[in-house]
Amino acid sequence: MIEVVNPTTEEVVGTVRSGTPADVDAAVTRAVAAFPEWAATSLDTRLALVRRVADAMVARTDELAATMTAEMGTPITFATRVQVPNPVGIARGVADVIEGGYFSGEEIGNSLVLREPIGVVAAITPWNFPLQQMVAKVVPALAAGNAVVLKPSELAPMTADLLASILVEAGVPEGVFSLVHGMGPVVGEALAAHPLVDMVSFTGSTRAGRRVSALAAETVKRVALELGGKSANVVLDDADVTRAVKIGVANAFMNNGQACSAWTRLLVPSSRHDEALEIAVAAASKYEPGDPAVPATRIGPAVSAAQRDRVVGYIRSGVEAGAKLALGGPDAPTQRGFHVAPTVFGDVRPDMVIAQEEIFGPVLSVMPYNDEDDAVRIANSTIYGLGGAVFSADPDRALAVAKRLRTGQVDINGAAFNTSAPFGGYRQSGTGREFGRHGLDEFTELKSIQR
């Protein structure tokens, strides 16, 4: 059995059975058998299913939010306002795209080009946005007519159980969707290597993504990867620095700093570094670690003791490298729970480990730059390319800089997150895209019929 530990209380709050390769094989075999009939169902049937799933998530918002808070420590207010509404928006966005004629086909010369389901999809998801990542894979895959086997994170399995119950109640046929709990090296690898799986959609670390790709390559199956990030928030010299830094801190510390697209590098003009650092410290000081089940809490614990220790190790690395520790540090801020002190570093150089590697915790690096070209160079200086931001008083200038950033998403002046726009990264942040029309593309094959 896998014990689910509440990272705030350090108490076991649930258990799930740990799956085996035999369980994976049984689930895939059922999926293969169920796929033809599901793929042949009417589009209206699949569309109605997606709508029911979205409505059910809305109806069970409180239960879903409380479960995520208990098993992975996300603040309950964030869970209620983001962790559940985002998946609802993703599901409804998929339905809207299908309703808009996505599967109608395209005439190209004497060819009719159609999109068809790819077959059996293995979905492997992380713990930090558990519902969102599961919905971003399972819902479009099912809507496109695929059968799905889901392996959620062993750190957030109870949210997966709730989604499974929602799917069953919504009417997903037997075998079309299966859930197999377990560890990545066992269940995840068995899915990635299974010869009857047609596609693997994986979200997680870059290291694990490389392993998934290697296993999947043996059977030349399609692979979609959403991996790590080290996103830069580029504050230009004409920007409202106070506003840009405050929004940047909120983004860097959202979900306890456990977000792959978080703006963990704050790039500011050298002449305004000290001012920006002071503003960042003042803003970050308001993030006092506490019980995430309390609505007023803005930051909860790391998901596990191992993750806490990993983040603390990076903080020590920053101190040893000579970065200026302006707030926080490696010491535990609470007596119980896997909390990490919200930490802000100043005078961070691009070559420092804390400026290059994904920390996945509440750690912000303030980095000075000389001019606009230097800012772009620093922003593009990591192996990642997932998210980013640009702040400027001139929208056209901000857009020009945004276009120069080698990253899959860029927010200008704090623009809102869009659950219908493509989400994914460049370079070692992954391959493929999620959400909306582009997310559906990942789960379909293209067929040309000449006539």
Image (spheres, rainbow, N blue to C red):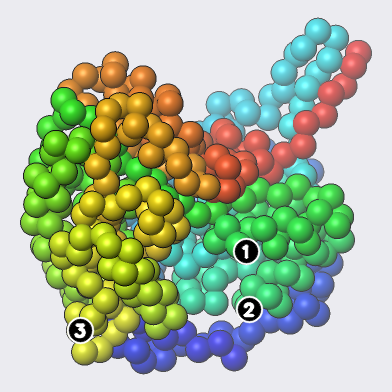
| Relative to 5, residue 107 above or below | above
Q: Residues within 10 Å of mark 3 (few under 14, many from 20)?
A: some
Q: Give the spatial CA distance, label 2 vs label 1.
A: 15 Å
Say how many tags the image has: 3
> Which mark, residue 182?
2
Q: Residues within 10 Å of mark 2 (few under 14, many from 20)?
A: many
Say which of marks 3 and 2 sits in front. Answer: 3
| 332 with respect to 167 (left or right) | left
Q: Give the spatial CA distance, label 3 vs label 2.
A: 31 Å
Q: Quadrant of residue 439?
A: top right
| 213 with respect to 49 (left or right) | right
Of residue 149 and residue 61, the one placed in the foreground of this image is: 149
Q: Are marks 3 and 1 in contact (CB under 8 Å)?
A: no
Of residue 317 and residue 38, the one placed in the foreground of this image is: 317
| 293 with respect to 271 (left or right) | right
Dot 3 or dot 2, earlier in sequence: 2
Quarter of the picture containing the N terminus is bottom right
Say which of marks 2 and 1 sits in front. Answer: 1
* Residue 302 locus on image (x, y percent): 35, 74
> Which mark, residue 323?
none
- Secondary element type, mark 2: loop
User: Which residue bears the numbered disc 3?
Assistant: 334
Dot 3 or dot 1, earlier in sequence: 1
**Amino acid residing under circle 3:** Thr
Residue lying at the far right of the rendered structure: 451
Dot 2 or dot 1, earlier in sequence: 2
* Residue 116 locus on image (x, y percent): 76, 37
**Amino acid residing under circle 2:** Gly
